[in-house]
Amino acid sequence: MSDPLNALQRYYLEAMGIQVWERCVPDQGSRFKVEGSKTGKVVQRPSALEPSPSSQTPEPAMEGVPEGAGNVGEGPDLLKPSTLNLEPVTTLDWQQLRERVAECRSCEELAACRTQTVFGVGNRDADWLIIGEAPGADEDRQGEPFVGRAGQLLNAMLRGIGLEREQVYIANILKCRPPENRDPKPEEAAACSAFLQRQIVLVQPRVILAVGRIAAQNLLHCETPIGKLRGTVHRHESGVPLVVTYHPAYLLRSPLEKRKAWGDLCLARRVIREAAGQTS
Ligand code: SF4
């Protein structure tokens, strides 16, 4: 029987979606802990990133991985212990997810510029999940999405349909502020998407309101202009109905469009009411 995989090898296999089954080794001084699996088989996971016995004996370098890349202080951020957490995002609870986001440095440029990550705010059992683009300067400073003038307008729009900000959950496509408020890069949105997907699963909203072009296009995986996306009910890949509307920052510049945004909110409210079996 071959030796158990080391932490770095397992990390890469899990990142690629490859599940590894190994012989169960009694946990007596072993660095592996034994966990049950859905199939009743036994899965071994490294207990932590403690120095492993194998680190005393040089191992052959993995294909495509620089030798010594798993060592502290060496190699790209991806391989540093803070991000070399082996629990898949899809299994994290709310607090674990928040902590994972707070320590994430997958986007080197954003991690270097941010004041803090902006995880989200609001009611974790909300019917409404409002998703914007990315934190701006105010959000980066305060650690909360949709603050400042755009946030105040969003609050006013919500109040217009009888909702307080505290009743909804608000998050963004990106958890970190892009410098100079530039658009998120596709690779940044892709890197951050697992966090948002997990938030959607944990909140289980009845409707997603995609606020602005960037949010809408990322959530629907398309490049359709926002004017053509709004006004209809889409289905997010999670199965949750999704309505698109304009970003409040755009509405501040184009107040004549507020009427359309109001229509979008009414549409989203209708989705929830119809799901609840109400008629109006
Ligand atoms: S934007 Fe998301 S993926 Fe990129 S560093 Fe921030 S938390 Fe990590």
Image (cartoon, rainbow, N blue to C red):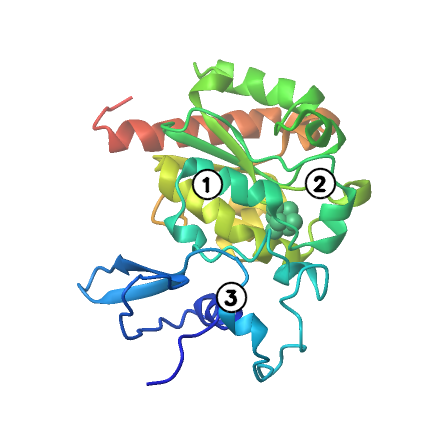
Mark 1 beta carbon near ligand 1 (under 8 Å): no
Of badges 3 and 2, the one in the foreground is 3
Residue 220 x/y as whole percent: 49, 53
170 to the left or right of 113 = left
Q: Looking at the rendered structure, which numbered label has been put on residue 52? A: 3
Mark 3 beta carbon near ligand 1 (under 8 Å): no
Residue that protrudes farthest toward the front in the picture? 29
118 to the left or right of 167 = right
The amino acid pointed to by label 1 is: Gln
Residue 25 x/y as whole percent: 29, 69
What's the CA distance linking mark 3 and mark 2?
37 Å
What's the CA distance linking mark 3 and mark 1?
25 Å
- Specify few, some or many for label 2: CA neighbours under 10 Å numbering under 14, 14-19, or 20 or more: many
What's the CA distance linking mark 2 and mark 1?
21 Å
Q: Are marks 2 and 1 in contact (CB under 8 Å)?
A: no
Q: Are marks 3 and 1 in contact (CB under 8 Å)?
A: no
Assign a secondary structure to mark 2.
loop
The amino acid pointed to by label 3 is: Ser
Q: Nearer the viewer, residue 277 or 196?
A: 196
Q: Say which quadrant the N terminus sits in.
A: bottom left
Q: Please say if 85 is above or below 54.
A: above
Q: Please say if 215 is above or below 245.
A: below
Residue that protrudes farthest toward the left in the picture? 40
Assign a secondary structure to mark 1.
helix
The amino acid pointed to by label 2 is: Arg
- Specify few, some or many for label 3: CA neighbours under 10 Å numbering under 14, 14-19, or 20 or more: some
Of badges 2 and 1, the one in the foreground is 1
Residue 62 x/y as whole percent: 57, 81
| Quarter residue 65 falls in | bottom right
To which residue does mark 1 refer? 96
Q: Nearer the viewer, residue 245 or 142?
A: 142
Q: Looking at the rendered structure, which numbered label has been put on residue 177? A: 2
